[in-house]
Amino acid sequence: MTDDGERGGGGAGEGAGAGEPVPSDSLKTFGAFVQGLREHAGLTRDAFATLVRFSKHTVESVELGRRMPDEEFVERAEVALGNTGALRRAYGHLTRQPGLAAWFREWARRERTAVSLCTYECRMVPGLLQSEAYARTLFENAVPPRTDKQVTDQLNARMERQQLLRERPTVPFSFIVAEAVFRERLGGVDVTRNMLDHVLASTEPRNMSLQIMPLGCEFHACLDGPVALLEGPDGKRYAYSEGQKIGRLISDLKEVAPLQQRYDTLRSQALNPAKSRALLERIRGAV
């Protein structure tokens, strides 16, 4: 998605220009509050992470104001730190940087608890699969140009979001990507090689499925453009659609259903995961 949504200049999942949460004063203050309570309780980050059942990396990111905590984190932290209600009250005053659009904010929140996630992309590598150098190239190519600080903040946000893949190894992630995306050489040969290696490594786990929509295909169910779909823990399905400087979270089942149908059809039209991986390895070898 883009900066105002998920692609951020480049790639499903984060927000093209604004990025996922750029640290705000309230995020930093909340993080410092969590850290202070944890240290007062005599808990190391490792011990606290075990108690709240989140990774140490997530705990660190919250404490440093780099990550917006979700309600589940706050509730577990409350119990672990005395159940005084202080964290719940502080959580109610959290704000993000204004650049993160409200519609993407809601998608990002639901994404963290999804029981399945599907993404079709035909413009760039999806944000969850981008290498750091590739993502930086996308941000640095933004028009109008961004400041060095904006690029760094957005890059950190995108890399932080990718923890989702490592923290949720039992959630099925499905990606369908147009072959042309992998044949482009954004950033040059070294960036492209690194990106291809990163995608191959990121999609190795059993819960990851990568399919390539080959060049020259006669049938294509998603000609209207990229789309992301997820299923929440309550079984409800949502979709996210994005274009130039605009994105839309779709919750109406009547609208989500045909998008899900298109994605399911596209799965049958794309190369299967084994053939897709073989093609990606050939593309990598030719770079």
Image (cartoon, rainbow, N blue to C red):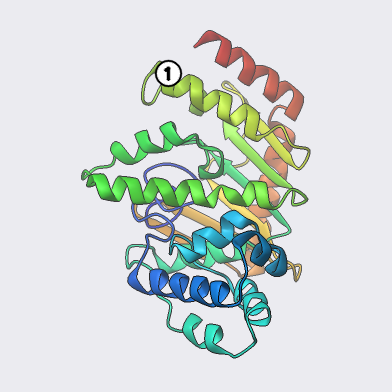
Which residue is at a point 38% across and 26% down the rendered structure image? 186
Which residue is at a point 42% across and 24% down the rendered structure image? 191
Q: Quadrant of residue 70?
A: bottom right
Q: Quadrant of residue 273?
A: top right
Classify mark 1: residues with Cα within 10 Å, few (<14), some (14-19) or many (20+). few
Q: How far from the left and from the top, in percent, is residue 81?
A: 63, 80
Above or below for 29 versus 163: below
Q: How far from the left and from the top, in percent, is residue 187?
A: 36, 25
Residue lying farthest to the top in this orientation: 286
Which residue is at a point 39% across and 54% down the rendered structure image? 19
- For residue 142, side relative to residue 81 (left or right): left
Residue closest to the eye, 126 or 238: 126
Number of labels in the image equals 1
Residue assigned mark 1 = 190
Residue closest to the eye, 272 or 113: 113
Residue 183 appearing in the image: no
- For residue 42, side relative to residue 124 (left or right): right
Residue closest to the eye, 165 or 61: 61
Task: Check disc 1 and report its element: helix, strand or loop.
Answer: helix
**Which amino acid does the dot numbered 1 rest on?**
Asp
Q: How far from the left and from the top, in percent, is residue 167?
A: 67, 52
